[in-house]
Image: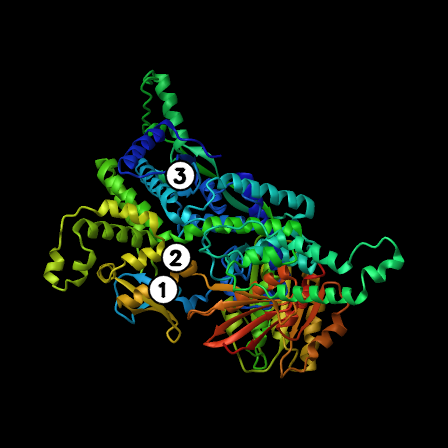
Amino acid sequence: MPKSLTPRLAALNEEILGHAREFGLDFFETIFEVVTYDEMNMVASYGGFPNRYPHWRWGMEYEQLSKGYEYGLSKLYELVINNDPCYAYLLESNADVDQKLVMAHVYGHCDFFKNNFSFRHTNRRMIDEMANHATRVRRWIDKIGVEKVEDFIDKALSLENLIDQHAPHIRRNPDPKRAEDEAKSNERVEGFKVNREYMRGFINPSEFLDSQRKKVEEEKQKAKKFPERPQRDVLFFLLEHAPLEQWEADILGILRDEAYYFAPQGQTKIMNEGWASYWHSTIMTRRALKDDEIIDYADRHSGTMSTRPGSLNPYKLGIELWRDIEDRWNKGRFGKEWDECDDLRARSTWDKKLGAGREKIFEVRKHYNDITFIDTFLTAEFAIEQKLFVYGFNDKRNSWEILDREFRKVKAKLLQGLTNFGQPIIEVVDGNFENRSELLLAHKHDGQDLKGDYARETLRCLQALWRRPVNIVTRYDGKGVMLRYDGQNHSEKKVDL
Amino acid sequence: MSLKIHQDHSRFKAIVRGKIKANLRKYVQKGEMLGKKGKDAISIPIPFIDIPRFKYGHKEQGGVGQGDGEVGQSLGPGQQQPGDGHQAGQGEGEHALEVDVTLDELAQILGEELQLPHIERRHNEKIVTQRIRYTGINTTGPESLRHFKRTFKQALKRQIATGTYDARNPVIIPTREDRRYRSYKLQDLPETNAVIIYMMDVSGSMGDEQKEIVRIESFWLDTWLRHQYKGLEARYIIHDAVAREVDRETFFHTRESGGTMISSAYKLCRDIIQADYPKSAWNIYPFHFSDGDNWSADDTRQCIEMLRNDILPSVNQFAYGQVESPYGSGQFIKDLREAVGAQQNVALSEIADKDAIYNSIKDFLGKGR
């Protein structure tokens, strides 16, 4: 069980907290708990929330984390939850210098959570909310049975990433107006109330009723042309229109809430990890390090910052970009004059001693997400200095290789990878496809094909919720394809796009 | 917290088990799985145990990396994707999940799915083996086995006894004499021993496909018998017109072109049993695989004679698997069926192709002998 801070750790925390405040970081109250490595793995398996609904996937996560640790492949150092108060976990077995580093890092994250605009709409009582979700799911399990509920969660999770990553608000409940309208139209078709049976033909002439029925039917058809515009929030569309039972809708709603809660973390990973790393490095090297801790600190810090040729470390890229921005705004290396200067010598010695760097990075951490951050601040000089390159898979040689070091291409590829959190963009196009209540989705293809076996398996899950055949239009090898699953068979046909 | 994750974890393991069980027929036929066998466990790829999503194919995606290197330089196969960070709740497995399953667990699943009876051992707890257990404490030993707690306890005792312990400044310094080391004791363990004697026809008519079938089938037979007996030995005999004993590697990769004299193998099998495996102490399992073509009716007669007089009386079960090949006449199994088929400890099985391995395992192990 997690423990609160020992007097020694509490003293260290006091110190780091003071440094963090002094540097102007602004965060919710932050509560540290001390855990063993196994407990850390458990909490991490639940995505940071020990009171999460029961599901085997957390067990799988746990198996992988523990195995990674046993084989010495990975070790979790810190874990922090966006909540008010923030919760963070410290490893019991860590040395003091590690604990200080983690605390400083955590305060960086907490400051980011509180101030970055992407998190403005997240639920700051998510710990309670998650516990509520767990209670609701358990209640359904008691009522419906564990097999059925788990099976539904499995299927719904498969659609978890089909939300509108940039939706500023979460609409929680399906439109209640729809049910009202339906009730009203039925009234109209049955006609007025008849007290004496022989009067029926006069009060409700059958021609009139027929024409009313026809009208209602037409209206229904018209209403069935939905959505009017393609809808990115597939989960919301399903909540509104799929024939879900109450418990299914409740669970789907829960999963959707959780997906929206985690979405901003995906959209700001480079900034957020970079920001936390910038602050642990600043606090440690300028204030908190003792002489005899320097080697250990350097070792830990460089471990976090290490890069391997075939991958991008968000901690490293992030911290370097933050430092670059600070440096540029300190020296005035921005604006029209700077941009238009092509005298290399002038550029290399350019320093207007503005000292505006610190202020600038605090402003940037408020108003940007990874995409706008990279788009605005990643410069050609930076890309060269950081040795960035584009890589891709060479089928002939069956290996990954460096494709390009050109700045424009690097930036474009980086932004492409960040768009929609690196997930394909998928929309609901028609909920009454071919007028047969089939579901039609479209993949907005941006040069990358969908993984085929996963796509087919996902359609299977989608069909289970929609209960009618489902289709998705995408491209493979440049050609339009519609994948279809009708509940029994998968099929595929060419379409013109 | 701890209790909850263990629930989810065991649910996960149950699902893995269920998936293996449901796909067992497929796994049984697959030879590639054998390549992933470790000492006690096997890695089984389980598709779609991770949650399927609409996502990009890994190869199409590519990305941005950081570091030295010329354009065109290889980064090596199977590098990680960018964004595979270790933040919780966002990691996503790209490939089918590989799950480690112990061979013992696998055997259990096999037993459940094929409804295999447990083997009735002929000999219980006669053979004694020894096992090392670290249970003792000694005053000497290698430093790697030093028992820190006991060492300090000893030092504390000494310091208290000699009055040098100061509770206000509790420093304990062990001396050479205080050191304590873990030491082992040999424990006797009763064990039932068993031996499998694999025999295979490697004459020209047994092609690669036939041998692959034998290889896969022998893996499952091994796994099951190992689950039933600790300390399983295996011997390998190949034969065409003459028989010789070989190691496992050679057994599966030899191809000869001569004729076939099955009696040569049975003779060698009989000799091995007589020399090394006294009936009183060993559970003996000869498995013979061929395509059913023998040199002559006379040789077949010799085989049957040897089976009746020497082999069958001393073994738990004699098994013959006939692998279909385009060249074999398939006569041998008919002869065996006629001559010894009625005997309790004879198992005969025809294996037409890889699909048939599943049922053949049941033929062989279904008697529980």
Judging by the rendered image, the residue that carries numbered circle 3 is: A91
- Residue A458 lies, with reference to residue A288, above or below; the image says below
Residue A439, position in %: x, y?
A: 60, 66
> To which chain does the residue with label 3 belong?
A
Distance from the alpha carbon under mark 3 to that under mark 2? 24 Å
Residue B15 visible in the displayed image? yes
Inspect the image, locate mark 1, and give the three-letter code of the amino acid beneath it. Answer: Gly
Q: Residue at x 65, y 45 (%)?
A: A140
Label 2 sits on a secondary structure element that is loop
| Picture quadrant where residue B351 is located | bottom right
Residue B110, position in %: x, y?
A: 64, 59
Q: Nearer the viewer, residue A192 or B15?
A: A192
Quadrant in which the C terminus of chain B is drawn? bottom right
Judging by the rendered image, the residue that carries numbered circle 1 is: B63
Q: Earlier in the sequence, mark 1 or mark 2?
A: 1
Residue B272 visible in the displayed image? no
Q: Nearer the viewer, residue A215 or A204?
A: A204
Eye-nearest disc, 3 or 2: 2
Crowd around label 3: few <14 · some 14–19 · many ≥20 (10 Å): many
Judging by the rendered image, the residue that carries numbered circle 2 is: B83
**Residue B70 placement, left or right of B23:** left
Label 3 sits on a secondary structure element that is strand
* Tag shown at residue A272: none
